Image (cartoon, rainbow, N blue to C red):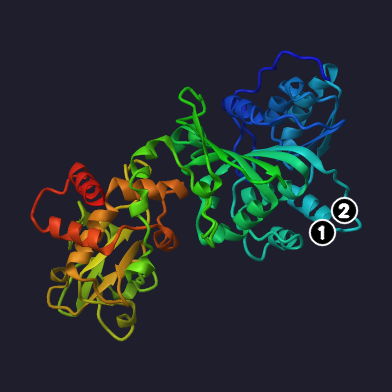
């Protein structure tokens, strides 16, 4: 057993800078986050511990792990540290070698691309550098999209990994390199938890490992505020080939962990066994209220006979047909800026966006028929309280035209590209602007984009409840957030 040692001070995050930070998509780990991540590991009885740090940076994560080696009852530690940025090697080596005086510890620095090195070894390439089966892996992977025809994508496909970002590629490869019962702790954007692009990655993760804990940072502005990271971030603790049990969900506002809370949830609350998309839901302490009403949210849009599509008008492709203001040869064009307090404020003469689109043979196929529609903005700003912001489109917006255009930054609820019944459209707008819907959406989405797939996967109350909301909205009462939430709660009880 290694003798206890005094934890060493990790490099303050403000000093973690590299001349190549943008090139390598680096986001360095603060000392407090590194310590928290290392603290999630549990003992794994082995004579020699093989530790993987994929994207080691300056060694903060490995150092945090080594600082608590005695708590893991480790006799010997062999660390493989991958770091492609040569400007960090000197400080990385200095950080890690310092532990050799107090631990039975050996480090090997790999200056090459982790994706190619790991993929070559896992694919059985005879010329690949051998890698061990790791007992622990700790990582803060780089964040950058992977193009479909890039060398990285080709390398990943050789080992059955299909993913679209470096961070999910690093996590997938690290997971496949683990020994049975090996543990992985990684910090990552929450974006992989839902959406079609990360479906193969989610399935691989759930097939290969059990989720032991997910930690959610509820403020995306604080954790990586100096790196301009806008997505919510999570810390993921996985164990390879462990039978899945309850999942610990912990939350804190930021990386001070001053308000840390945690609770265990049955796995089916995190991933529904009937969900082919394998969305990963993350309940939070703020969602205690809707839990008692969740049984009333059991219908999909398909069950309700409602469809949702992305607005078909891509303005830069139809630029010659756009008009600043409507005239006798145009139809209204609705943008997100036209949604105000649940209604459509159109036209807006002072806006830089077009308010109309010409009606002709080139544009008509992109237009919808005049009618009642509910629309939702596809993007919200980080300062807004709600992610889902809906508006009601009425036929009166169309004036004398029989058509209307919806710009691509809107999601449109419709029935076969025709309008909704008026009461249904009004009720759906009220429902989508409720806190209960917004909280449901936040369980599985950590970014500001609201995709059609997200809206299709969500669950809604019955048509009767939505209709009652529509009738209520026609009474003329002020549609404040409090009034909407109280009325929906009353109807669901």
Query: Picture coordinates of residue 39 (x, y %)?
Result: 64, 27
The residue lying at 33 percent from left, 71 percent from top is 305
Q: Residues within 10 Å of mark 1 (few under 14, many from 20)?
A: some
Q: CA distance from mark 2 to mark 1?
A: 9 Å
Neighbour class for label 2 at 10 Å: few (<14), some, many (≥20)?
Answer: some
Q: Which residue is mark 2?
A: 128
Q: Secondary structure at mark 1?
A: loop
Q: Is residue 423 left or right of residue 241?
A: left
Residue at image coords 24%, 46%: 489
Instruction: Answer with left or right where residue 363 lies relative to residue 281.
Output: left
Which residue of the protein is positioned furthest toward the right in this rendering? 126
Residue 456: image location, x then y, percent: 41, 63
Q: Are marks 2 and 1 in contact (CB under 8 Å)?
A: yes
- Residue drawn at the location 17% of the way across and 71% of the way down: 326
Residue 123 — which label?
1
Task: Evaluate whether residue 162 shows in this view.
Answer: yes
Residue 426 image offset from top left, x and y in percent: 19, 61
Q: Earlier in the sequence, mark 2 or mark 1?
A: 1
């Amino acid at each position: 057993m290694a003798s206890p040692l005094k934890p060493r001070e990790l490099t303050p995050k403000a000093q973690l800078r590299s001349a190549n930070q943008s090139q390598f998509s680096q986001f360095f780990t603060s000392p407090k986050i590194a310590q928290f991540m290392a603290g999630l590991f549990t003992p794994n009885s082995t004579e020699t511990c093989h530790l993987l740090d994929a994207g080691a940076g300056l060694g903060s994560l490995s150092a945090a792990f080594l600082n608590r080696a005695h708590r893991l009852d480790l006799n010997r530690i062999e660390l493989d540290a991958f770091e492609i940025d040569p400007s960090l090697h000197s400080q990385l080596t200095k950080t890690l070698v310092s532990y050799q005086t107090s631990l039975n510890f050996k480090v090997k620095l790999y200056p090459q691309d982790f994706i190619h090195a790991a993929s070559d070894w896992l694919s059985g390439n005879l010329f690949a550098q051998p890698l061990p089966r790791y007992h622990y892996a700790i990582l803060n992977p780089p964040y950058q999209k992977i193009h479909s025809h890039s060398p990285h994508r080709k390398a990943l496909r050789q080992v059955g990994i299909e993913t679209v970002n470096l961070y999910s590629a690093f996590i997938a490869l690290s997971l496949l390199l683990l020994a049975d019962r090996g543990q992985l702790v990684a910090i990552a954007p929450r974006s992989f938890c839902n959406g079609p692009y990360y479906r193969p990655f989610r399935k691989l993760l759930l097939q290969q490992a059990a989720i032991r804990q997910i930690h959610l940072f509820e403020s995306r502005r604080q954790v990586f505020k100096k790196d301009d990271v806008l997505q919510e971030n999570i810390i993921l603790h996985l164990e390879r080939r462990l039978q899945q049990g309850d999942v610990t969900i912990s939350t804190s506002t930021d990386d001070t962990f001053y308000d840390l809370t945690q609770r265990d949830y049955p796995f089916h609350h995190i991933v529904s066994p009937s969900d082919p998309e394998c969305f990963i839901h993350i309940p939070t302490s703020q969602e205690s209220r809707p839990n008692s009403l969740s049984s009333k949210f059991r219908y999909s849009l398909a069950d309700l006979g409602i469809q949702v599509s992305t607005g078909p008008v891509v303005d830069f492709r139809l630029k010659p047909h756009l008009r600043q203001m409507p005239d006798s040869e145009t139809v209204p064009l609705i943008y997100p800026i036209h949604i105000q307090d649940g209604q459509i404020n159109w036209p807006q003469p002072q806006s830089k966006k077009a308010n109309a689109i010409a009606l002709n043979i080139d544009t008509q196929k992109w237009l919808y028929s005049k009618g009642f529609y509910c629309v939702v903005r596809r993007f919200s700003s980080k300062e807004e309280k709600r992610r889902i912001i809906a508006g009601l489109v009425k036929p009166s917006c169309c004036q004398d035209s029989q058509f209307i255009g919806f710009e691509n930054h809107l999601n449109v609820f419709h029935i076969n590209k025709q309008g909704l019944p008026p009461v249904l459209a009004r009720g759906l707008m009220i429902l989508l602007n409720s806190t209960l819907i917004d909280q449901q959406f936040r369980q599985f989405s950590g970014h500001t984009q609201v995709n059609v797939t997200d809206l299709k996967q969500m669950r809604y109350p019955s048509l009767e409840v939505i209709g009652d909301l529509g009738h209520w909205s026609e009474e003329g009462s002020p549609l404040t957030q409090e009034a909407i939430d109280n009325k929906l709660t009353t109807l669901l009880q």
